Image: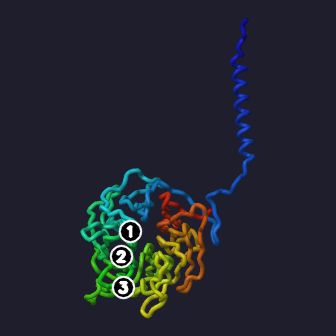
Amino acid sequence: MSVTPPSPTKLGRGLLMVGVTAVVVAIVALLMLPRPRDPLVFSTEQAQIRVITITEQLEKPWALAFLPNGDVLVTELRGSLRLIHGGQLQAQFIGGVPSVETRDQAGLMDIALHPRFEDNRLVYLTYSKKGARGNTPALARARFDGARLTDLRDIFVSEAWSNESGGNTGSRIVFGADGTLYMSVGDRHEQTPAQDMRTDKGKIVRLKDDGTVPPDNPFVSRPEVLPEIFASGVRNPQGLFADQATGTIWENEHGPLGGDELNVLRSGHNYGWPVITYGKNYDGTTISRETAHDGMDQPLAYWVPSISPSGLTIYRGDRFPLWRGNAFMGALSGAHLRRVVIEGGKVVHQEVLGIPKLRKRIRDVREGPDGFLYVLTDLPGGLLRIEPAR
């Protein structure tokens, strides 16, 4: 018995009908699904924003700096320097970085460009330097040729050595409006040295761009005080910002169990740690019963419980007009970005930007040259851009 096969024309039509039916079923199924709002657009108190993920392929990023062409340099705590070019993280690491001591919170930390970078190509890095006395925050300077660092050398090694810890390093750096460089140095988990003017522990230091001491530093005429010290009595300053519009230097720092602070730094001033504090030891015991003392400055704001502020910027752009003059800082333990409204030298309002894509440990926050806000996140290590939704 013979069977006549279907003609090619009939077979093609049948397959076409099967294909069309499958597509129709798939479209109907999709239409029946709930249609969520665009997950990238969020409402805040004063702006509709969109959060864009640039990369989530970084490993413990610590700081970022914008190059004149819009590219981004990012430090990673493990001791690597990465380049984001054209919005893409480059696979090749930047060569020529210093050898770092990676321990606890220590490693390759902050990065800043010289104010005249386009002319001199100078890049500044803070890192944990290993030596016979343990490790200490150091400041290195190099030239960036687009692919690697050259002529790298230490221009300042802080007197903040520790054999016990890689923590409380501080290590933020900013250039002030006058061209001098400010560097934060933490107390290295030792508390009392923050009031000892013979050490850099728990201090803000001020340097020339070559690492030497400016002649108008507040303590240069006192031989019993390290001449680089600009301010004292800080614990673990993880945010530092120089407002070029006003000349003001802002700082935030981790307290222990509570007592995180936001401060305005002034030449020669003492910010009290550990003589005055709103925090306690991690085991709940008392550090000090005083929260105020003569000759010691009060913070503009403090947080109990801790939010672990890290990174700091005062927004001056025009993309978010209602945010102009507001402070933004990451919150590591709080897992959010925080907006702080400051009027007349006082904090009058705070907003927690707890939107889903920002519910992360935020290590750094910067205003980009495009007027958008950029944040670095831990776990996963990523770079996000915050822009107006319309």
Where residue 193 appears, as percent x and y from the top left, is 35, 81
Q: Are marks 2 and 1 in contact (CB under 8 Å)?
A: yes
Q: Secondary structure at mark 2?
A: strand
Please name the residue shown 50% across and 75% down the image.
314
Q: How is the image coloured?
A: rainbow
Q: Which residue is mark 2?
A: 181
Where residue 293 appears, as percent x and y from the top left, is 45, 92
**Callout 3 environment at 10 Å: few (<14), some (14 to 19), or many (20+)?**
many
Where residue 239 appears, as percent x and y from the top left, is 45, 73
Identify which residue, 6 or 137, lies in the foreground: 137
Marks 1, 3: nearer the viewer: 3
Q: Which residue is mark 1?
A: 112
Where residue 347 appears, as percent x and y from the top left, is 56, 82
Q: Which residue is mark 3?
A: 195
Residue 101 visible in the shown view: yes
Horizontal side of 142 relative to 240 (left or right) equals left
Q: Secondary structure at mark 3?
A: helix
Residue type (three-letter) at the residue carrying disc 1: Ala
Q: CA distance from mark 3 to mark 2?
A: 22 Å
Where on the picture, by quarter, is residue 68? bottom left
Residue 243 visible in the shown view: no
List the single residue furthest toward the bottom.
Answer: 294
Marks 3, 2: nearer the viewer: 3
Which of the marked residues, 1 or 3, is nearer the chain's N terminus?
A: 1
Identify which residue, 170 or 345, lies in the foreground: 170
Q: Is residue 72 above or below residue 22?
A: below
Horizontal side of 366 relative to 205 (left or right) equals right
**Callout 2 environment at 10 Å: few (<14), some (14 to 19), or many (20+)?**
many
Q: Quadrant of the C terminus?
A: bottom right
Residue type (three-letter) at the residue carrying disc 2: Leu
